[in-house]
Image: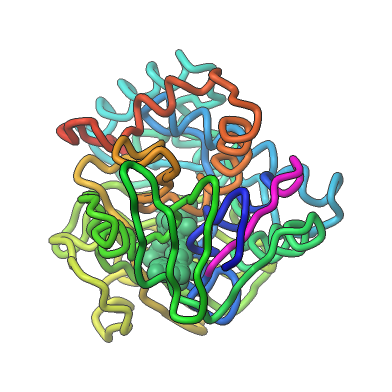
Amino acid sequence: MKNYDVLIIGAGSVGVPLAFYLAKKGAKVGVIEKMPSVGRGQNRAAIGGIRATHSDPAKIQICQRSLDIVRRMEPEYGFDVDWVQGGYMFPVYDHDTEKKLRNLLEYQQHFHLNIDWITPKEVEQLAPGITTKHLLGATYSPEDGSASPLKLIDAFYVMADYEGAKFHFDEEVIDFETAQNKITKVITNKDTYQADLIVNASGGDARELCAKAGLDVPVYPDSHEGGITEPVKRFFDPMIVDIRPAKGSANYYFYQNGEGQVVFCITPDPKIPGKDCDNTSEFLPQVIRRMVNLYPRLRNLRVRRTWRGLYPMTPDGFPIVGYAKEYTNMLLAIGMCGQGFMLGPGLGEILSEIIIDNNDEYDDILKELTLYRNFTGEEKLK
Ligand SMILES: Cc1cc2nc3c(=O)[nH]c(=O)nc-3n(C[C@H](O)[C@H](O)[C@H](O)COP(=O)(O)OP(=O)(O)OC[C@H]3O[C@@H](n4cnc5c(N)ncnc54)[C@H](O)[C@@H]3O)c2cc1C
């Protein structure tokens, strides 16, 4: 039987940064991953957006930390992760959306986030050639940005490995043994483990995995598609988010990455519940029509690849983070919805401080994201 101080289930957006920060603090860390390498769950499906401009204190705090970490990846740790501080821009073409975003703006500014209303002229400067007919302005947060999900998780993996974290790939957790209020054994298809603390970071599989320990967690994946074009010379900087609903989709967003490729995805409406990751022939015509309408300059770009992945959703659109009441040695870091990539680094560092240093500075985050909330709230920008 293998023994660890902390055993993390899942080498994804959340599990890998967490492994690094825990190992750096001296913990003996094991990570079990059913795939052959890191990031092959939903991390690789993410398009790479990172923003702190959310609508609730927990995600704001976690993503502010993520931004700080990702910005320092190259100067401090020597990893080029394609960080581009292009900002997030939500262009507005109708008064309803303007009202909604301006209300949110007040809230976000209350948290000292660098976000403001910009004029149509300023919108055009940031995205030359964007449709200006009926354009009322936009919200713009210049400190947000993007990075490569593949490069970032790889950087964390190299650093975690260097700090001594042990990764067990191609190995699936299939069961737990419990006694009183403790997980006494984690059973995989290859081995058996014991740990002082087990962190469940299993993404879209969290519900099935938790059920094996008798825990009912409301994580219900739904499918989202993304795509990427050929690289071209940079012609716009921000992540552009169009939140006007249209037939078949609630919103869509796109940006130009560090290599000049335009990366994009759409939020289907109605949702597509389940774990289907086969891409469809519907996605491209749907998203491209909307993108070219908003930004005609995109029309000559050639799309290189599309893919489909999952958002591990919760009913209120907020993650589930914290200790399970039922077991003294199980911590949940699941239900990351459409934001696990941007939450992962900050959450990893914060959780390491909670776990190793018993830091109670983050009690508010744990309270907001507890499994034992009523899930009736709603994320305004999910
Ligand atoms: C099209 C698309 C675009 C997106 N864009 C963004 C974006 O721009 N920004 C952003 O922040 N987020 C984005 N996301 C969301 C993001 O990808 C997810 O929220 C995030 O990857 C979830 O992180 P996770 O660590 O919870 O799960 P994962 O990264 O999926 O990691 C969980 C890991 O657990 C492993 N696992 C599961 N069960 C077991 C088991 N029993 N035993 C062993 N291992 C197990 C899985 O194989 C997986 O590797 C996007 C998602 C999609 C689909």
What's drawn in magenta, residue-wise? 23-32
- Horizontal arrangement in the rendering, residue 311 relative to residue 229 (left or right): left
Q: Nearer the viewer, residue 80 or 155?
A: 155
- Horizontal arrangement in the rendering, residue 325 relative to residue 231 (left or right): left
Give the image quarter of residue 234: bottom right
- Horizontal arrangement in the rendering, residue 67 relative to residue 200 (left or right): right
Q: How is the image coloured?
A: rainbow
306 above or below 212?
below
The residue shown at (70%, 46%) is: 27
Q: Nearer the viewer, residue 171 or 99?
A: 171
**Where does the image place residue 351, in percent across and percent down from the top left?**
56, 37
User: Where's the C terminus, which quadrant?
Assistant: top left
**Where does the image place residue 16, in percent across and percent down from the top left?**
60, 58
Give the image quarter of residue 349: top right
Residue 29 lies in magenta, yes or no? yes
- Horizontal arrangement in the rendering, residue 143 relative to residue 299 (left or right): right
184 above or below 66?
below
Q: Is residue 254 visible?
A: no
33 above or below 278?
above
**Where does the image place residue 2, in percent across and percent down from the top left?**
60, 65
The residue shown at (48%, 83%) is: 305
User: Where's the N terminus, which quadrant?
Assistant: bottom right
The residue shown at (42%, 80%) is: 306
The residue shown at (59%, 25%) is: 358
**Where does the image place residue 271, in percent across and percent down from the top left?**
17, 61
Q: Quadrant of ligand 1?
A: bottom left
Q: Residue furthest front?
A: 179
